[in-house]
Amino acid sequence: MINVLKYELKRLFSRKEFFVVMVIVFFYISIDFIYHSVMLINSPFFELPSAYQMWLLYNKVRGHWGQLFAYFLIPLFATVPYSDSYIEDKKAGVINFIITRCDKRLYLFCKGIVVFFSGFIVVFIPLFFDQLLCFCLLPVYSPSENVFNHPTYNAYQFLSTVQLPKLHSLNPYLHNLFYILLNGICAGVIALISYSVSFFRKMNRYLVVIFAFLFYLLENLIGRIIKSSTTFSIFDYLIILPYSNKITNYQYFLIFMIMLIFISFIIINFRYSRDDT
């Protein structure tokens, strides 16, 4: 199993699609960061946001850019690097070479792990890098937050309906890290969905990406339509909304992610069984 994982990881890191996506994500984040940094040049120190508020998905300083990233770009960035690798292996005949040296089920399982990992890192690493950039420019805690004589990291919750306020009060940077992990996990699951779809007949590398993208948009659309006190739109769980009437329930997010992983493996196993018969 370790050898198969190493082989798949080596192929992932050598793919031009992986390299291109990483360059695009870092370029997007860097341009956005530079743009908003320039906007803050003439701001008095006491009006500057804290480094955690400047983070891309905090939706206070860089709102529209962060929303665009979470709502449209994550499914594209997650699926392009490696989700179509099974189709490419089949087309090139590589799969026949691999399964003579290991069990096919093991090969598919290891590929699924690496597909999830590919989606995770192309989102997690750039978002983490973005937070580090914010540290380079802004104070850890800004005087602009200090209200009601509370510490700045604690006072901000009195002005907002920020999700997970207890974690935010404990440490807003851990709060941001939690969201970075959520975005990485969501991207990994989207990549896994795209991978499972690639097992259907008449699929190509473009349809695999398009299907996952449309699925993500449709889930968010339906989640917005459903009338409930709790939001069922995944988008609302990936971006920090300091001023929002959306009530998030992270048990739903966890259950939904697990359900999608489970469904993906059912599809893969079903198609594997049919191919072997």
Image (cartoon, grey):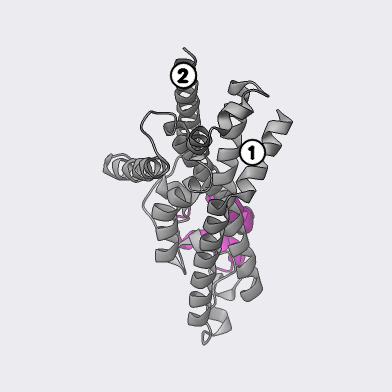
* Chain-order first, disc 2 or disc 1: 1
- Residue 168 in picture, x, y percent from top left: 57, 54
Instruction: Find numbered disc 1 in the image and state the secondary structure of the residue it sits on.
Output: helix
For image coordinates 63% across by 53% down, the residue present is 174
For image coordinates 31% across by 42% down, the residue present is 218
Task: Name the mark on residue 8.
Answer: 1
Looking at the rendered image, the quarter that the N terminus falls into is top right
Which image quarter: residue 171?
bottom right
Instruction: Residue 270: tell me if it is visible.
Output: yes
Residue that lies at the very extreme toward the top in this rendered image? 277
> In this figure, which residue is indicated by the disc labeled 2?
275
Instruction: Residue 53: tell me if it is visible.
Output: no
Q: Residues under labels 2 and 1: Cα distance? A: 22 Å
Q: Is residue 177 left or right of residue 263?
A: right
- Mark 2 is surrounded, within 10 Å at the Cα level, by few (under 14), some (14 to 19) or many (20 or more) other residues, namely few
Residue that lies at the very extreme toward the bottom in this rendered image? 42
